[in-house]
Amino acid sequence: MFLVVDVGNSHTVTGMYKDDKLIGQWRIKSDSRSTSDELAIRYHALFAMEDIKQEDIRGIVIASVVPTLQTAWLNCCKKHFSAHLDNEVFVVTVDKIKDLITVQLDNPKEVGADRLVNGIAAWNLHKTKQVVIDFGTAITFDCVTEKCEYLGGSILPGIAISLEALANKTAKLPQVDVSEVPNSIIGKSTVQAMKSGILFGYGAMIDGLVQGIRAEMVTNPDEDFKVVATGGMARLIAPFAKSIDVIEPMLTLQGLEIIYRKLVR
């Protein structure tokens, strides 16, 4: 049994694997002030709810974009898990995963670990040229070739950030719930207009970026090219972005599982 941990800016998603099957998955708010002991208490309770014994965890893989939380997680693992681990906790860095994905950037170390993990997972699923769109705090576009080469991508503000900015930086625009789909692009009220702008607007923006990325990556019109979406807002935006081919909600956890299986175990 092994634990995979994806520490993001807004949420931390963890998964427990047994015999290469996901038997538990949890999503909690990322708090950069959390201590190692607080993490241990929280996850001890979550494991107990699924009847998972802490001593059965034999390996841990962590991908983090929050340095303070990464430190807390490492201290937590050292203090509360290390006695039963078969190997040291594996923290994803570009150097450690170079045998799984080739990073073709001027400075490979600046790319977020989660973006590379997503690229590894998507390539193992589809083994073709593709762009992975992760709908998180930021929306990232990550381009991967059929040889699992990471080319780079694009980054834009996430949906929650945009909604928060509209509400906080304007005098009359309220907080809105975009889970209720507007009937048309032309909103008949302020709230409807905001929902329309976010959902149809982000959908159009995604389709436009995908069109440009496809033009740069694909030279043969008959060549296979996938658009893979993941992240908390993927299912919300997918109906408004016709370019999205498939939604993989557990993509990052799948990538961490592949890393454990191929590099750690």
Image (cartoon, helix red, strand yellow):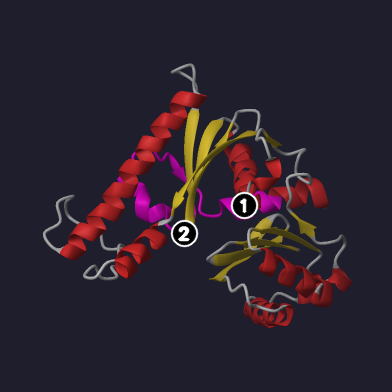
The reply, left or right, for residue 115 in relation to residue 219 is: right
Specify few, some or many for label 1: CA neighbours under 10 Å numbering under 14, 14-19, or 20 or more. many
The mark nearer the N terminus, 1 or 2, is 1
How far is disc 1 from disc 2 in space, using C-alphas? 14 Å
Report x, y in % for residue 136.
49, 57
- Residue 1 got which mark? none
The reply, left or right, for residue 236 in relation to residue 226 is: left
Q: Does the rendering let one see residue 86?
A: yes
Q: To which residue does mark 2 refer? A: 232
Picture quadrant of residue 142 = top right
Figure check: 16 above or below 31: above
65 within the magenta span: no
Q: Image quadrant for the N terminus?
A: bottom right
Report x, y in % for residue 169.
32, 66
Residue at 45% across / 18% down in the picture? 222
232 within the magenta span: yes
Report x, y in % for residue 64.
66, 59
Q: To which residue does mark 1 refer? A: 114
Report x, y in % for residue 43.
67, 77
Q: Does the rendering let one see residue 241?
A: no
Residue sticking out furthest to the left: 188
Q: What element carries label 1?
A: helix
Residue at 64% across / 60% down in the picture? 22
Q: What residue type is labelled 2?
A: Gly
Query: Considering depth in this image, is 211 or 51 the residue closer to the camera?
Result: 211
Q: Is mark 2 on a helix, strand or loop?
A: loop
Query: Considering depth in this image, is 25 or 118 the residue closer to the camera?
Result: 118
Residue at 35% across / 42% down in the picture? 205
Picture quadrant of residue 207 = top left
Magenta residues? 230-257
Q: What residue type is labelled 1?
A: Asp
